[in-house]
Amino acid sequence: MTNNNLVYILDGKIYINLTNACTNDCKFCLRQQKDDVQGTNMWLDSENISAQDVITQLEKQTDKISKGVTFCGYGEPTIKFDILKDVAQYLKTNYPNVFIKVNTNGHGNIINKKDILPELKGLVDEFSISLNAQNEELYNLLSQPKVNDAYNEMLNFAKEAVTLGFKTTMSVVSGFENYDLNLKECEKIAHKIGAEFRNREFIPNGY
């Protein structure tokens, strides 16, 4: 029997922790600092999970679903694309007005070797995509990606999300050590793509 915390609560809202696997190893990631989010351990005992495992945990938090659901944990949710899709379908079927957001590094298409965005139309309302830097060099330094052409893959994912009509936000983490992050340039990149821009201050001790 595993103790997988697939569903956790942050600021009164539901978050889903599908996997600990990721195609980035971001230096500023919360998982580099601590094992938990507000007391919920985020490291999974097993990656062998099903959509039903997630739904079972969601059903214990039905009073909070109306506040929105975000796929965001200690890993890249699109790595578990089929489960993400099935859980989102369950939510939209049973709670048609629920707002579903996916926090992603934007590598979903290269991970799944196909264009996943059309399959998520009507299931996901918003993507928050980790832009992380104003150029590929700094991105690679901060994000330490494990896939080829990661920066451009992320930018292309964001462009397509905007084109397909998803609400799209591109984010950076500022205030981490002395990296030469240019917020104005990052904001310009996001707006040129047609996305909103969000700067998140680095939180030394996490949530």
Image (spheres, rainbow, N blue to C red):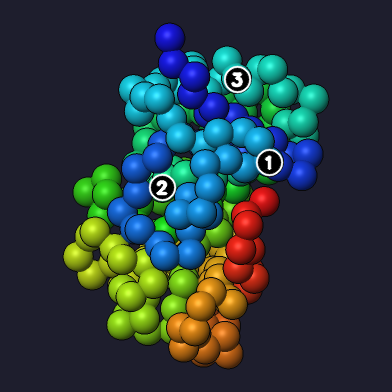
Secondary structure under badge 1? loop
Marks 1,3: beta carbons within 8 A: no
Frontmost residue, 30 versus 75: 30
The x, y position of residue 70, in whole percent, is 61, 43
Q: Which numbered disc, 2 or 1, marks the residue closer to the eye?
A: 1
User: Looking at the image, is mark 2 or mark 1 earlier in the sequence?
Assistant: 1
Please say if 82 is above or below 105: above
Per the image, the residue denoted by label 1 is 38
Do the residues bearing badges 3 and 2 touch, measured as CB atoms within 8 Å?
A: no
The 10 Å Cα crowd at callout 1, few under 14, some 14 to 19, many 20 or more, is few
Residue at image position (41%, 37%) is 19
Q: The N terminus appears in which quarter of the rendering?
A: top left
Nearest to the observer: residue 58 or residue 126: 58
Residue type marked 1: Gln
Residue located beneath label 3 in the image: 57
Q: Quadrant of residue 20?
A: top left
Residue 179: x %, y % from top left: 46, 83
Count of residue discs: 3
Label 2, secondary structure: give it: loop
Residue at 54% x, 27% y: name it. 5
Mark nearer the N terminus (3 vs 2): 3
How many other residues sit within 10 Å of disc 2, few (<14), some (14-19) or many (≥20)? many
User: Residue 91, percent across and down?
Assistant: 61, 28
Q: Quadrant of residue 173?
A: bottom right
> What amino acid is labelled 2 in the image?
Glu
Give the crowd class for mark 3: few <14, some 14-19, many >=20 residues within 10 Å.
some
Taking depth in this image into account, of 169 and 134 the one nearest to the observer is: 134
Label 3: element kind: helix
Residue at coordinates 46% horizontally, 88% vertically from top-left? 180
Q: Mark 2 sits on what residue? A: 76
